[in-house]
Amino acid sequence: MVRGRDRLLAIVALTVVWMLLWGVFSWVTLLGGLLVSMLVLTVFPLPPVTFAGRLRPGGLLRVAIRFLTDLVVASSQLAWTAFGGRRVPHSAVLAVRLSVRSDLHLTLCAEAVSLVPGSLIVDMDRAAGILYVHVFDVTGPADIDQFRRDVRDLEERIVRAVGSDAEIKLINEAATAGSTSTVGGSR
Amino acid sequence: MTVTAVLDVVAGVCLLGGALLSLAAGVGLLRFPDLLSRMHAATKPQVLGLLLILAGTAIRLGTAVDITTLVLVGAFQLVTAPVAAHMVGRTAYRAGLFRRDLLLTDELAADRRNP
C-alpha cells in the first residue's frame, strides 16, 4: 500500500522532470514521460524511503524564505572572507544530534545544512542521528553555540513544513527539554 | 522606464551578482588555507551564483521552453551540490588531508576514538 504510493509519487515526479525537459505540454510528452518513468523505476528500483509526513504550505514558505536569506547572507560573508585580509580563517568540526531520526528527515536536514555556505557535512551517524558538520570561519565558543542553535532551528522548521504529527510532537518535546537543560551538556 | 527596460536592469543585476559570487568562489579556492575550507568556497557561493545567473538568463530569454530547462538546471544543482561536497569532505577528513591546527574543536575525532 505504502510502497504503491511511493512508486506513484516517483512516477509523477519523474514525469514532471521529463516534461520540463521538453518544455512544452502535449499528450505525447505526457504519455512518453509516464512510459519512461515506469521503465526507469523498473530497471532502477528506489530504496525504501517513505514519506510519512504531510506538506504544510505555511511551513514550506517559511523554510523557503529563511533558506534564501541564509543563502544570500552566508554567500556574501564567504565572498567577503575570500576577498578580505590576510587573516587565516579557523574552523571547527561539530557534532549535532537531531531530534527526529528518519532517513528522509536526516537527508533533508543534511542537504539544507550543506547548501548554506559555511557548513559542510563531513560525516554522519545514521543510527544515532548525528550530523558532523565542518563549520568555516569560527572565532570562538559563542559562534559554536550559535551554530548548534541554528541547526536545531533549521530542523524544527523542516519538521514543521513536511513532518508527520508524531515528528512534530518529538520536536516540541525536544524544544521544551532543550530550554530546561543546561547549554553546556546538550549537543 | 518601460517594463522591458526594468527587466533588463534586473537581469543585468542578477548576472553581475552571479558572476561576482563565482569570482569570489575562485578567489576563495586559491586563498583558503586547507582542503576542507576550500570545499566551502568551491561548492557554496557558486550555488547562489548559479541561481542568480539562471534567473538573469530566464528573464532575458523569457520563453517557456528555455525557462523549464533553467528550472531543471537549478533544481539538480541544489540536489547534487551537497552530495559532491560531502563525498570530497568525507574522503578528505578520513584521509587526514586537512590542517588540524586550524580546527577550534573536533568532535568527530573525539567520537571516533570512543564511540
Image (cartoon, rainbow, N blue to C red):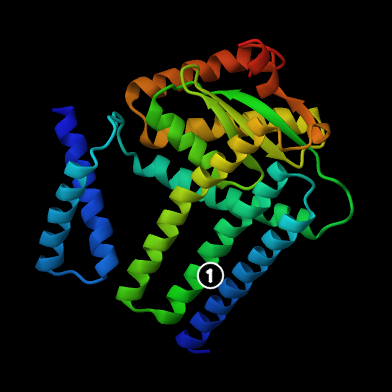
- Figure label count: 1
Residue sitting at x 23%, y 38%: A45
Residue at 47% x, 44% y is A62
Residue A74 drawn at (x, y percent): 66, 50
Q: Quadrant of the C terminus of chain A?
A: top right
Query: Residue B43's spot in the image, x, y percent?
Result: 60, 52
- Dot 1 alpha-carbon crowd within 10 angstroms: few under 14, some 14 to 19, many 20 or more: many
Q: Residue at x 15, y 48 (%)?
A: A38
Q: Which residue is mark 1?
A: B53
Residue placed farthest to the front in the image?
B95
Q: Is residue A30 left or right of residue B49?
A: left
* x, y percent for residue A43: 20, 44
Residue at (14, 69) in percent of width and height: A26
Q: Quadrant of the N terminus of chain A?
A: top left
Q: Is residue A187 above or below residue A11?
A: above
Q: Amino acid at mark 1?
A: Ile
Above or below for A181 versus A77: above
Horizontal placement of A70 versus B97: left or right?
Answer: left
Query: Residue A6, position in %: x, y?
Result: 21, 36
Chain of the residue under label 1: B
Please, what secondary structure does the residue beneath circle 1 have? Answer: helix
- Left or right: residue A91 versus residue A107 is right
Of the pair A35 and A148, the residue shown nearer to us: A35
The quadrant in which residue B27 appears is bottom right
Residue B94 vs residue A175, the one in the foreground: B94
In this view, the residue farthest toward the right is A86
Please determine whether, in this image, residue A185 is positioned above or below residue B100: above
In the rendered structure, the answer to whether residue B35 lies left or right of residue B58 reads right
